[in-house]
Structures are given as structure tokens and as C-alpha cells.
Amino acid sequence: MMPQNNIAFKNKGDILVVEVKHWDGSPEQIQGAEQEFLDIVSSDDYRGVVTDLGDVALGAETQKHIRESWTQLIEETDFERFAYVSEGAGAMATNANIESDVATKAFTDRSEAIEWARSP
């Protein structure tokens, strides 16, 4: 499991920013944070979520986990938009593996992702 200080949940008004630091791409490292995410979003009123993955490479096992678990997390919320940010291809790989009708998009810039997540 990933140490808690490697994942930060930040309130940016109507947007929740999930900042992931030093993630090696292993699904086991983020499973505790997934439940914490659900706990946070169930008690606050957010319009969208921006997940900043940093610089991470996602293997086949992790992409399968994202397709199954993160899609389910998205379906359990009422958010309008989910954005993914990374320095490399991590955000694009994450976005490509989400199977939901909710709007999702990959970015390399966190500010742009927050702006998009806020847009109507």
C-alpha cells in the first residue's frame, strides 16, 4: 500500500484535486486511497475531479485495474467531469481505460485540467 503522505486530497472550490506522488504504477499502492476518495466525495459537494498522477508508467495490470476499479469509482459519484494530469503518457493511458459516460480528459497541465473540470 502506498504511504498516505504520497496522496493528497486538495479542495479547489468545486473541484477536488487528487495529487499522487512517487507512484510506481502498482494497483496495490493506491487501493487504500480509492476508499478514502469515496469517503471524501460523499461528504463534500464537488463538480469534478482532477487526478494528478505525476510521472508514472502504467503497465497492463494497472490499466486493467483502472478500467475496472476507477470506472466503478466514477460511476459511484455524481461528478460531471474527471481530468487526469501527468508529465508523461500516464494521463492518456488512464483516460483511455475509463469506460464511462462521464466526461473525462487527459492533460499535461494541472491548471488547464482544473479549468476544464469547472467548465459547463
Image: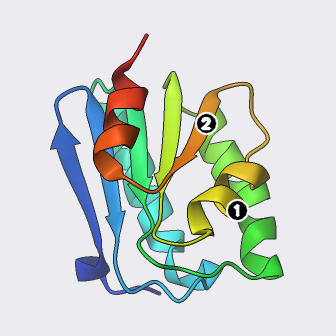
Q: Is residue 8 left or right of residue 72?
A: left
Can the viewer see residue 96? yes
Report the number of numbered marks.
2
Q: Position of residue 66 (x, y in %)?
A: 70, 61
SS for tag 1? Answer: helix
Q: Position of residue 52 (x, y in %)?
A: 40, 60
The residue that disc 1 covers is 93
| Placement of 12 over or under 118, stated as above or below | below
**The C terminus appears in which quarter of the rendering?**
top left
Amino acid found under the numbered disc labelled 1: Ala
Crowding near pointer 2: few (<14 within 10 Å), some, many (20+)?
Answer: many
Q: Position of residue 37 (x, y in %)?
A: 40, 52
Q: Quadrant of residue 22?
A: bottom left
| Placement of 75 over or under 58, stated as above or below | above
Q: Residue furthest top?
A: 120
- Tag of residue 104: 2
